[in-house]
Image: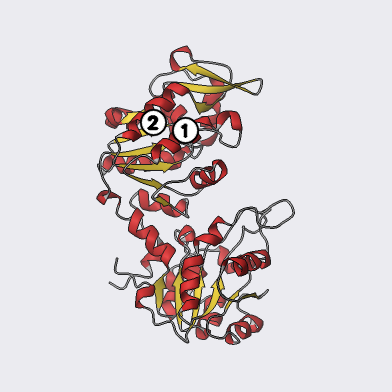
Amino acid sequence: MGIPTLDDLAVDGTTVGIRVDINSPLSESGGLADDARLRAHVDTLNELLDRGGRVAILAHQGRPGGDEFARLEDHADRLAELLDHPIEYCDATFSADARAAVNLLDDGEAVLLENTRFYSEEYMEFPADEAAETFLVERLAPELDAFVNDAFAAAHRSQPSMIGFPVRVDSYAGRVMERELDVLSNIEDTPRPRVYALGGAKIADALEVAESVLSRDLADTILTSGMTGNAFLAASGVDIGEPSREAIVDRDATAIDQAADLLEEHGEKIRVPEDVAVSRDGEREVVDVADLPVDAPALDVGEATIAAYADTFETAGTAILNGPPGVFEQEAFAVGTREIFGAATRAEYSIVGGGDTAASLRSLGIDGFDHVSTGGGAALRLLTGGTLPAVEVLKTE
């Protein structure tokens, strides 16, 4: 990759700053509701500590003004339970107190510094050289011998903690970052036929993935579902009904036209639902596409679609999932997500694109995939052939 990894870092006795992404859902009481992102970084953190590093951890939680904009004390407590080494919490990020906490570390000890986004410049985006001049980087970098970026889920952001340190300090990719790049940057090397399942309510993202992988001949089949599938149904000439159409237009006024363009150019590779599930008095009712329109929104795919898509995965070399097929938060409309994603595990090789897709797997207890990405936006950027600022600044050639 032309990117140094932990294999290239002499850790023993050095002070290592590491950026992780442990931005997590919070419970109503304010504690962590899901620790999946914390657990993802355990291997990287334990390795640095096992090798005698003095580890200063940088992370964010939520965004200014949001309900989940919070301190990282609970995160530190959970990391202390997950790691094999001591970890402290410091309620400062780059002040004299924070720098003192870093300097007091012994080999094999870690400190989690406070939410980087409590500092206003961290929620802005910069070129790398300007990010290196921000207060956070300028004050903290002199205390570090090396910097590790393991925050793949935030790698599409050009924020100071993501791209500023490599300008000032020798920098490396952590194990999460390394693994994500190995998988998502090399989709063209995965077995064929390559089947993409594109669903969810983020229609613009799904259309971007579809256009990218079809134009680069990376996809042999695209299975559409969710609101994305409804958009392709409408684009194919099906009257899906006003509730479903309005839901699409409210999210993306041009989605149906874009889907129509993709069908015209790549229609032989794009599959649309054969039936949908709508809500009737809170109950699941399956409607064949031939019987549309109906006066209720489509919230899931129906059983005929589930069976057809599952059959496609039986012979797939690679399954790539981006977006759940239905409103999985409601049990009546979790059927498509549970069955289609479960079938995808039977492909020779399977990849989950992160974000809402990974959340649906955790919620429904579906496992067995070869790779589940920790990042939504970052995974999308790589799946569509883009670059990641936090990765570009690590490159040595």
Dot 1 falls on a residue whose secondary structure is helix
Tell me the number on the disc at residue 74.
none
Mark 1, residue position: 339
Instruction: Identify the amino acid type marked 2.
Output: Ala
Sequence-earlier tag: 2 or 1: 2
Image quarter of residue 140: bottom right
Residue 347 percent across, percent down from the top left: 34, 40
Please report the residue visible at 49 percent of the width from the left and 40 percent of the height from the top: 202
- Decide: marks 2, 1 in contact (CB < 8 A)? yes
Q: Quadrant of residue 280?
A: top right
Task: Tell me if 314 is positioned left or right of 56 in this view.
Answer: left
Q: Does residue 27 appear to the left or right of 264 in the view shown?
A: right
Label 1: few (<14), some (14–19) or many (≥20) C-alpha neighbours in 10 Å: some
Query: Based on the displayed image, in which of its 4 quarters is residue 30 positioned?
Result: bottom right
Please provide percent x and percent y for residue 105. Answer: 58, 84
Q: Which residue was labeled with disc 2? A: 310
Q: Nearer the viewer, residue 201 or 31?
A: 31
- The answer for how far apart the CA atoms under marks 2 and 1 are is 8 Å
| Amino acid marked by disc 1 | Glu
For residue 253, say whether it is visible.
Answer: no
